[in-house]
Structure formats: structure tokens, C-alpha cells
Amino acid sequence: MRRLLNTLFITSEDVYLSLDGENVVASRDGAQLARYPLHTLQSIVSFSYAGAFPALMGACAERDVALLFCTPQGRFLARVTGKTRGNVLLRRTQYRVADDDRRSAAIAACMTSGKVYNARRSIERTRRDHAMRIDDALFGDVSARLKALLPNIMAATDRETLRGLEGMAAVNYFRAFGEQVLVDRQTFRFNGRNRRPPLDPMNAMLSFAYTLLGHDCAAALECAGLDPAVGFLHCDRSGRDSLALDLMEELRPCMADRFVLSLVNTRVLQKDDFETTESGAVLMTDAARKRFLAQWQEKKRDTLTHPFLEEKIPWGLLPYVQALLLARHLRGDLDAYPPFLWR
């Protein structure tokens, strides 16, 4: 259980929530673990299958405390609402900002700068830890180019310019991405990003990781009261969670890309874990996907110190914290959206 930004996160899958007077009570097997005054909370996010007492659901609806349920893996399930549905004022603000190119660009610039910063951070970590096993000149050039793009990104005032700068950053970043593979480079060679379908094992794993991260970001935005479909950098498209794609941009290098590299470099996945279809698509085997998912869930339990909150949180809560910070900015509580900057 963690309390962050007036939101109570129930991260254990066997914790049951109930109401005692004006307090939320968390218990396991009938034993009380903790209690929190309901009036101090803005929302409760439960990743538990145990559920909640109906009286608590009613109290949350009456007091406008959002009560949201997700699976332990982070997939959004449901939201308890009263007479009104969702946070209409927050979403109306989101829609107005999305229709304003300059205001959207200001938020998108923060997200894009976070992505480029974290991509450069990943490159520099590899330079530091494996200097004798990489092409240091290549990594130095990529790092310098990413650093040079940051001032231009923050100065951009329209989304089209930002998309161009983000594309330039991605091209440079992926120049060095394959060089971070330290074992079996023949099997796990990376010659650039491809998808629909992925044509090599690295792209197969990246696509799967991005899908998982995208689901987590969409669930986080739902929990924060935002509409995952209306983005600031990615344009609206039917059936696409554009804001979830925006949010995951800054998290890709540190949550997804580094995770995939760790699976390869620690030999969790190897050549026999992939198969090629008649169409040329490269897919993970069922056994490989199970190991991938198990490692993904384990990674989400690892902790980090959030640079803005200066508190330790699990990696799995990072999308939820960033979604809450975005909601606070849209409400006017924060002057700018603070992207996650990996330390």
C-alpha cells in the first residue's frame, strides 16, 4: 500500500477494502493492516482481486473520491461513480487543451524532452558500464546529438515541429540501440525499428514491451480521470489511445527498451525462443511470452526514487504517478507537466 499525491494505491492482490466510520480500512484475511481518513483522499486505486465493501463504494461516490479497480497486472477494470460519470471538468479541460496547438505543444514538449533525456541517459549508462565492449565513438556521437536536440524541443511551439524533432531523436537513438546487445549479436542484431509485423527477435520483444507499457499507461490515465484517447502529441485516431502513447514516450527508454536489453544480455531469452512464420514475421514462442511477462511483472516491483516527488515507488506505479501529475497540471495545480527524468 502506498499513498502518493492524495491517492491510495493498493498494490497487494489479496487486500480487502472496507469502511469504518469515516476511515478506509485495508485488511488481509480479516486482520487490519492500515486505515486512512477518507476525507484526506482524492482517489483510491486497487490492484487487488479481493475487492471492496459496498458501503465503501457508496461513501466514495457520495464524497467524490474516485475508486478504481485494476488487475494485479495493471489492466483497468472499472471505476465506481455516483450521479455524475467521471471527472467532467478535468476532461473538458483536456479536450480544450488538445484543440489548442500551442498549449498542447507545451505539454508535448515536456513529454518529448523526457523521452530524449531518458534515451540519452540509457546511452550514457551503457558507455559507463560497458566501455570496453561497445563502439564508444558511436555512443558519444549519439549522446551529443540527443543532448543538442533538447533545447530545440523545449523551444518548440507547435506539434508538427515536435514530431520532427522526436523523429530525429529516434533515428539517432536507434543507431546505438543494437550496440547495447552484448551477447549473441547474430541472433539479436538490430538494424532499425520495424513492426506490423516485427522482422527480427529484437523488434518482436520491443513491440510486445510497448504493448504492455501502453496498456499500463491507458489504465493509469483512466485512473487519473483523463481520456486516454485524446492526446497532445499524437493526433486523434479512432480506436487509438493517443494520450497513452504520449505518456509512454518518456517511459519507453527506461521501462521498455532497457528491459528488453536486460532479457537478452542476461540470456533470459535466447535464439530458440523465437519462430519465423511463412510471412516472415518473427514471433516469441508461448513459453517465451510467459517468461517475458513474469520478468515484466517482477521488474514492476523494483523500486526507484521519483525525481519530482523524491519518494521511493515501484516501477509499476510510475505511469500512474505521471498520469496524476499530468492531471494536476491540467487542473492548474502545477505550472508545467513534470516529465519523468531517469536518474
Image (cartoon, rainbow, N blue to C red):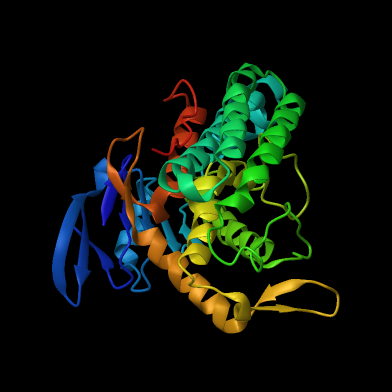
Residue at x 61% of width, y 49% of height: 177
Q: Quadrant of the N terminus?
A: bottom left
Residue at x 66% of width, y 25% of height: 105
- Of residues 53 and 117, which is closer to you in this image? 117
Residue 161 in which image quadrant: top right
Residue 260 lies, in percent from the top left, at 54, 60
- Of residues 307 and 2, which is closer to you in this image? 307
* Residue 36 visible to an observer of this rendering: yes
Residue 16 lies, in percent from the top left, at 27, 69
Q: Is residue 21 left or right of residue 217?
A: left
* Residue 73 visible to an observer of this rendering: no
- Of residues 285 and 36, which is closer to you in this image? 285
- Number of numbered discs visible in the structure rendering: 0
Would you place residue 9 above or below residue 162 in this image?
below
Residue at x 64% of width, y 62% of height: 202
Would you place residue 101 above or below residue 81 in this image?
above
Residue 228 lies, in percent from the top left, at 61, 48
Residue at x 33% of width, y 39% of height: 5
Residue 225 lies, in percent from the top left, at 51, 45
Q: Quadrant of the C terminus?
A: top left
- Of residues 84 and 51, which is closer to you in this image? 51
Would you place residue 111 above or below residue 210 in this image?
above
Q: Is residue 78 left or right of residue 30?
A: right
